[in-house]
Image (cartoon, grey):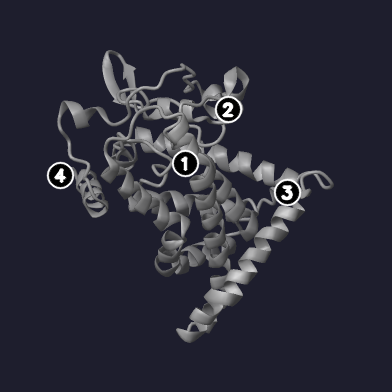
Amino acid sequence: MDFLIDLFEGLQAALYEGVVQPIAVAAGQSQLLEKAYEGTGWLVAGLLQLVVMLVVIGPMQRRWPVEPVTDRRAVRVDVLYTLIHRLGLFKLVMFFTFDYAFEQGLGMLRVMGLPTLHLDGLWPGVTDLALVSFVLYLVVFDFIHYWIHRAQHQSDLWWALHSLHHAQRQMTQWSDNRNHLLDDVVTSLILSVVAVLIGVGPGQFVALVAIGQLSESFQHANVRVWFGRMGERLWVSPRFHRRHHGMGIGHESHRAGRVVLGGCNFGVLLPWWDMLFGTADFQRRYDPTGVRDQVEQGRDYGAGFWAQQRQGVLRLLGRA
């Protein structure tokens, strides 16, 4: 763990001193150097993820595909979403649009007496160990993310945005970040608030998000892979998550003879929550992905990036 931390910090410092800091100073933004260093950490984490995706997951998709990729354009749009997020562009926009309001809101909560629950201090000598605290924060974050994901599938308004993610019928390693930007803003703000309230440090937060994103890229990959009977119940696999994207399966439930929003396999990293709350489906199947109304009603979710964003807003307003 210490070796990995030192390696990451070395890469972050080198990129910051060699590229980011000179650019910030030349642009007259020296007052933002501290934030620029933090942003460099996100950039390094994203670049490392892209390397793993290209060198490890990409060859796996070619070796063990679930289905042939016939719509390359759809995949190229997903690549754009991935680059926006993994290269820190989304974080940059969030900083210039929501950071001030976020800090002001937290300040008001502090004045009202809201404390920070430092989870790594729950059991001195144990939870304050780097690896133990990291695992503890990962489990807590995944629990929160599970309920966020369920809400995305059970709220008509939120589903109007989140359905864009499910409308991809050519799932690949690039599909994880295929989300409506408003959906990403809401999720990012919730997780950031949770991180502050439970005492996650900036470096830990970057690592938690990066590991989560890389795992989710693998989950969405076009690979016929499962982790075995026991492994499937320890970590979300591509097979488990593809079930969640299955057309008419992963985002629909049947109640009293009606089809309603819902579905199965909402776990982001850990399938434990699905098992605990009765939403797990471990069938070893690889069904076609997408949203039912794409086929049955010809609903348009947009072909390009801006078209997809526009259609999401129209769905939210009830006009598409």
Measured in 3D between alpha carbons, the distance from the residue under mark 3 to the one under mark 1, in whole angstroms, is: 36 Å
The alpha-carbon separation of the residues under discs 2 and 4 comes to 38 Å
User: Where residue 120 is drawn, which disc sits there?
Assistant: 3
Q: Earlier in the sequence, mark 3 or mark 1?
A: 1
Tell which of 99 and 289 is nearer to you: 289
Task: Report x, y in % for residue 113.
Answer: 61, 59
Callout 2, which amino acid? Answer: Trp
**Image quarter of residue 260:** top left
Q: Earlier in the sequence, mark 4 or mark 1?
A: 1
- Indicate whether 228 appears above or below 251: above
Tag 3: residue type? Asp
Distance between the Cα atoms at labels 4 and 3? 47 Å
Q: Is residue 225 left or right of residue 175?
A: right
Identified by mark 4, the residue type is: Arg
Q: Residue at x 53, y 40 (%)?
A: 215
The C terminus sits in image quarter: top left
Viewer-side label of 3, 1: 1
Distance Cα–Cα, label 2 vs label 3 = 22 Å
Q: Secondary structure at mark 4?
A: loop
Q: Nearer the viewer, residue 245 or 277?
A: 245
Q: Specify the quadrant of the image occupied by residue 185.
A: bottom left
Q: Position of residue 35 (x, y in %)?
A: 55, 71
Point out the residue furthest to the top here. Answer: 257
Residue at the (18%, 43%) spot, across then down? 318
Residue 103 x/y as whole percent = 51, 66
- According to the picture, the residue beneath numbered tag 4 turns out to be 319
Q: Which residue is mark 1?
A: 58
For the residue carrying disc 2, how many other residues have a C-alpha within 10 Å: few (<14), some (14-19), or many (20+)?
many
Label 2 belongs to which residue?
Answer: 272
Percent across and percent down for residue 84 are 40, 57
Please state which amino acid type lies under the numbered disc 1.
Answer: Gly
Q: Position of 258 compared to 111: left or right?
A: left
